Image: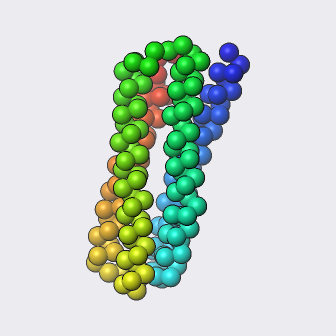
């Protein structure tokens, strides 16, 4: 049972890193976008896409794997409603965040081509990106609520 406790602690730490990384990248991008400098926006979005996104994807892949391992160690059946619901919500959250990452890539190109983040097309793209991010965040928070309220 000590292995289960270790996995539970590591899974919790990975969850904190995932949500902390989302918050940190969001704050970093928003702060630089608000500065209004096209070069700074392009540089910050490039850094987010090169460093932050792969780390978030790695964390997003590790969480279901470690969660499945914990469920297997606990001897719980995978067909439970809270597990299936969490997996479906997690899948849709990942899809929303992949759409967000694509939108960020397009936003970076638009901001550099149009000379800054003040144009209408860039603002429209930012609103779509914010909508994808908000939907993904709400889905991930729903998964977190399901996993914390599990019947154990």
Q: Residue at x 39, y 39 (%)?
A: 91
Q: Relative to residue 98, is residue 27 depicted above or below?
A: below
- Which quadrant of the figure contains the N terminus? top right
Residue 134 sits above or below residue 116 on the image: above
Relative to 85, is 45 on the left or the right?
A: right
Q: Is residue 138 left or right of residue 1?
A: left
Toward the right, the furthest residue is 2
From the top left corner, tell me how far across and down residue 3 is, in percent: 69, 21
Quadrant for residue 72, please give it. Answer: top right
Residue at 36% across / 80% down in the picture? 118
Residue 10 at what x, y percent from top left?
Answer: 65, 34
Nearer the observer, 87 or 142 = 87
Q: Residue at position x 59%, y 18% from top?
A: 73
Q: How many numbered markers are drawn?
A: 0
| Residue 45 x/y as whole percent | 49, 69
Q: Which residue lies most toward the bottom here?
A: 115
Residue 68 spot, x, y in % from top left: 52, 27
| Picture residue at 65% right of the left edge, 21% below the top | 4
Q: Is residue 82 visible?
A: yes
30 to 57, vertically: above or below: below
Res 139 visible: no
The colour scheme of the drawn protein is rainbow
């Amino acid at each position: 049972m000590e292995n289960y406790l270790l996995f539970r602690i590591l899974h919790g730490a990975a969850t904190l890193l995932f949500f902390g990384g989302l918050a940190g990248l969001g704050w970093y991008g928003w702060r630089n976008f608000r500065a209004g400098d096209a070069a700074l926006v392009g540089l910050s979005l490039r850094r987010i896409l090169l460093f932050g996104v792969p780390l978030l994807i790695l964390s997003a892949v590790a969480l279901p794997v470690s969660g499945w391992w914990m469920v297997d160690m606990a001897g719980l059946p995978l067909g439970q409603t809270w597990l299936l619901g969490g997996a479906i919500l997690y899948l849709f959250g990942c899809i929303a965040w992949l759409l967000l990452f694509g939108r960020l890539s397009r936003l970076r190109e638009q901001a550099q081509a149009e000379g800054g983040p003040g144009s209408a097309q860039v603002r429209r793209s930012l609103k779509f990106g914010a909508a994808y991010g908000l939907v993904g965040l709400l889905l991930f928070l729903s998964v977190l609520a399901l996993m914390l309220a599990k019947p154990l």
